[in-house]
Every structure is written in structure tokens, then in C-alpha cells.
Amino acid sequence: MASKQMLVAVFAAAALAVAFLPGLAAATEHVVGDDKGWTLNFNYTAWAETKQFVLGDTLVFKYSSAAHNVVEVGGPDFLKCSQPANAVVLTTGEDRVTLDKAGRKWFFCGVGQHCENGMKLKITILETAPPTPQPAPPPTNPSGKLQARFGEAAAAVTALAAAVLVL
């Protein structure tokens, strides 16, 4: 009896692992500006449009700390390139920002007129990544459909047999 309960527990754990594995995918590290880094004369809007940001990802801002910084602000301050007194200002030259909340985040360089000259980044963070589109199955011939149905039936019988063994 105990072995049947252990078998049920193992099957349940395996089913849960398979169900939740996609959600345990590794977070992505996004180097802002890719090989250009955080600098002037780069289109960060276009860069962000090619990325997908999800909870747990990290932004890495790489730049010369003598020439730039990273200021995290709200939307209205971002639009005006205005740095409020309570803004988070990063200055190491290799700043890491973990994306720990879904929604929008806004960053700009607060040195001189850099923000006004386009050194700014707006991103949207998703709760989870949308599902990856699956390719369409290849066309099958009638005998292929019969084989597929036979496979489905065999799987159903196997599942039923396993359930009977458990009980």
C-alpha cells in the first residue's frame, strides 16, 4: 500500500514539474545598447522594441562613469528630462537593475543635455513571457491520422491502467 502511495506521489511531482518548468526559465540579462552600451547617438527606443522584458530580467548599463550616469524616474519626468530630488541615480559605469515589478520603467542620462539629445530608455516589463508560437504540424496523409489516433488511444489506455494500479 505504501509503495502505491509513493508511486502516486512520484507521478504527481513529475506532473507538477512538467507543468511548471516553462515558468522556471532563466532570466535574461539585457545589456542596454548591446555592444554600444549607454552612450550618446544611439536609438534606445528602437533597441527596446527588439527586446522582451519580463520579471526577473536584468538591465545592465555599461558606460564611462566620467561621462554619463543613469537616472531612474517616472513617466512625466522622463518626458521632460527632469531629475527630481528623490530620483535614483546610478554612477558605477556598469549598473545592474533587476526588473522586479511588472509595468513601465524610465531611465535617462542626467549629465548635461544628454537626455534632451535622446539618451533615454523606456521599457515595459511583462509578468511572464508570452508563449512562443508553435510551428504548424506537417500535413499528414490518412494513414498518418490513423496512426496518430492509435497513439492517442494507447496513451489513454496506459493512463487508465496506471490509475487502476494506483487505486
Image: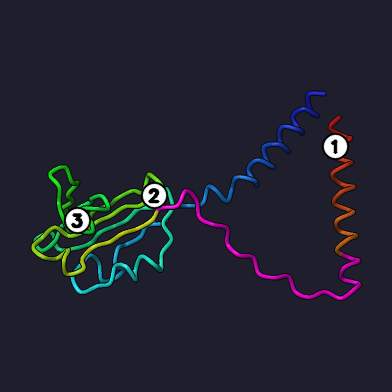
Which callout, 3 or 1, points to the residue nearer the camera? 3
Of mark 2 and mark 3, the one earlier in the sequence is 3
Please state which amino acid type lies under the numbered disc 3: Val
Rendered image coloring scheme: rainbow
Could you tell me which quadrant the C terminus lies in? Answer: top right
Tag 1 residue = 163
Q: Which residues are magenta?
A: 125-147
In the depicted view, which residue is nearer to us: 22 or 88?
Answer: 88
Whether the magenta-drawn stretch holds residue 49 is answered as no
The Cα atoms of the two marked residues, 3 and 1, are separated by: 58 Å
* Residue 112 placement (x, y as % from top left): 8, 63
**Disc 1 residue type (three-letter):** Ala
Q: Amino acid at mark 2?
A: Gly
Residue denoted by label 3? 70
Element assignment for label 3: strand
Work out whether 11 lies above or below 133: above
Distance between the Cα atoms at labels 2 and 3? 19 Å
